[in-house]
Image: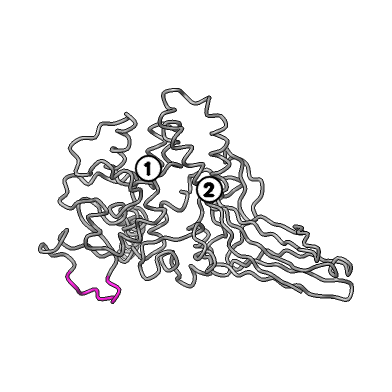
């Protein structure tokens, strides 16, 4: 009898383990970001961001100036006829997640027919919009109130969209993962995912200290999502130093940039590059670059081959060290350490290469492709900015 009881107990343990491994309820993140997203169907709430902005004025005002709102921009649009409908659908999962906006955009390309939708024409140009994160099957989701009160009534038929469903997951880094992290099955270059921002954060001290993506990119819940394209945001994440140390035999110049506060690699993707340069100016006014280094992950245009990877993990530094003779140092008037950020370096190369071969494009695609490609190239070329200029003078 004891043997039968033991076998039954062991079988029950196996069954319980099997249930926990394979039959457990799907988590909120997996349900909320199951690509492609399900259609909203018939909805009573207006999904237009401007409609949301009538009550959520601050969030709407911030969102309008973000890269999220411009995720369907020239750099995205010109590529669609070239990658086709299927490839475009995969891209739309993140650039404009709601299937209704995908249909509206594809109808402009003649790939689908849009009719009878509550989503007005033009919604497809809003990129990652309010509904992309907050609306599922006609219901509105969001984080708990800042005061931490979890006992409030959040659903009420007398208020717009009947209230909302609070979810703590809105303040977890995993909420951003599906669009900022390649899946495990995705292509790798030299053993690295093309998108690994979440993974870089997951392996960092920031994750271990419970500093989430939202703490830096949505401080005080601001819908700004600032990053590498914003100089002030970047300045908060790095430290720069310049020292000129006179010595008996001349001088040593030390210029350093440290990833002191970025919760992932700096820069994270293969698109941006950061240029470090040390320049000298002589008493006669002659300028000369004496040292330089590029930070970034340089890949070829086809994203097949790694050329170099000099990104800085959290806490790492890049150091430029130059030794000058006594004679060289005696002629110096000024030393400068200049840091320049090119947020769209890869895009500049890729857009320019395609523009150079624009005559080879299919004639029926040129009216769509060429205007968007030209605008994308102009925007990419204008994105570069000077981050820091430190100076030492005699």
Kindly indicate the quadrant of the structure image that contains residue 54: bottom left
Most distant residue in the left direction: 158
Label 2 belongs to which residue?
194
Asked whether 101 or 306 is in front, the reply is 101
| Quadrant containing the C terminus in the rendered view | bottom right
Residue drawn where x is 40% and y is 57% of the image: 176
Most distant residue in the top direction: 363
- Residue 154: horizontal and vertical position, in percent? 19, 67
Asked whether 87 or 381 is in front, the reply is 381
Asked whether 199 or 156 is in front, the reply is 156
Q: Is residue 146 magenta?
A: yes
Residue 345 horizontal side relative to residue 59, left or right = right
- Residue 274: horizontal and vertical position, in percent? 61, 56
Of pointers 1 and 2, the one earlier in the residue sequence = 1
Residue drawn where x is 27% and y is 71% of the image: 145
Please, what secondary structure does the residue beneath circle 2 have? loop
* Pointer 2 local density, CA inside 10 Å: few below 14, some 14–19, many at least 20: many
Residue drawn where x is 46% and y is 48% of the image: 183
- Residue 110: horizontal and vertical position, in percent? 32, 29
The magenta-colored residue range is: 145-153
Residue 363 against residue 267 in the figure, above or below: above
Residue 147 against residue 353 in the figure, above or below: below
Residue 159 horizontal side relative to residue 140, left or right = left
- Residue 233: horizontal and vertical position, in percent? 49, 65
Marks 1 and 2, Cα distance to the nearest angstrom? 17 Å
Label 1 belongs to which residue?
92
Please, what secondary structure does the residue beneath circle 1 have? helix
């Amino acid at each position: 009898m004891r043997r039968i009881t033991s076998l039954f107990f062991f079988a029950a343990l196996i069954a319980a383990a099997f249930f926990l491994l394979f039959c457990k309820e799907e988590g909120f993140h997996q349900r909320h970001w199951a690509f492609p997203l399900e259609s909203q169907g018939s909805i009573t709430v207006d999904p237009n961001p401007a409609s949301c902005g009538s009550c959520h004025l601050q969030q709407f005002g911030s969102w309008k100036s973000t890269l999220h709102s411009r995720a369907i921009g020239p750099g995205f649009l010109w590529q669609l006829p070239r990658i086709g409908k299927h490839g475009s659908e995969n891209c739309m999962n993140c650039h404009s997640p709601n299937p209704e906006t995908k249909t509206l955009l594809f109808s402009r390309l003649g790939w689908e027919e849009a009719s009878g939708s509550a989503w007005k024409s033009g919604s497809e140009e809003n990129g990652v919009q309010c509904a992309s994160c907050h609306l599922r099957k006609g219901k509105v989701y969001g984080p708990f109130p800042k005061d931490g009160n979890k006992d409030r009534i959040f659903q009420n038929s007398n208020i717009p969209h009947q209230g909302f469903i609070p979810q703590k997951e809105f303040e977890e880094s995993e909420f951003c993962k599906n669009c900022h992290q390649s899946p495990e099955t995705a292509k790798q270059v030299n053993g690295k995912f093309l998108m690994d921002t979440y993974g870089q954060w997951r392996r960092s001290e920031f994750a271990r200290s419970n500093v989430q993506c939202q703490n830096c990119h949505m401080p005080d819940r601001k819908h700004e999502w600032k990053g590498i394209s914003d100089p002030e945001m970047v300045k908060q994440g790095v430290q720069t130093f310049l020292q000129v140390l006179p010595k008996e035999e001349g001088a040593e110049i030390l210029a350093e940039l440290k990833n002191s506060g970025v919760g992932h690699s700096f820069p994270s993707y293969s698109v941006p590059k950061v240029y470090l340069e040390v320049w000298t100016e002589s008493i006669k006014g002659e300028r000369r670059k004496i040292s330089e280094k590029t930070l970034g992950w340089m890949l070829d245009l086809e994203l097949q081959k790694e050329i170099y990877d000099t990104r800085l993990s959290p806490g790492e530094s890049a150091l430029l060290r130059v030794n000058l003779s006594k004679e060289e140092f005696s002629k110096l008037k000024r030393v400068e350490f200049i840091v320049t950020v090119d947020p769209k370096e890869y895009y500049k190369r890729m857009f320019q290469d395609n523009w150079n071969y624009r005559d080879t494009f299919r004639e029926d695609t040129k009216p769509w492709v060429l205007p968007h490609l030209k605008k994308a190239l102009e925007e990419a070329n204008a994105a570069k900015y000077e981050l820091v200029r430190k100076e030492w003078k005699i």
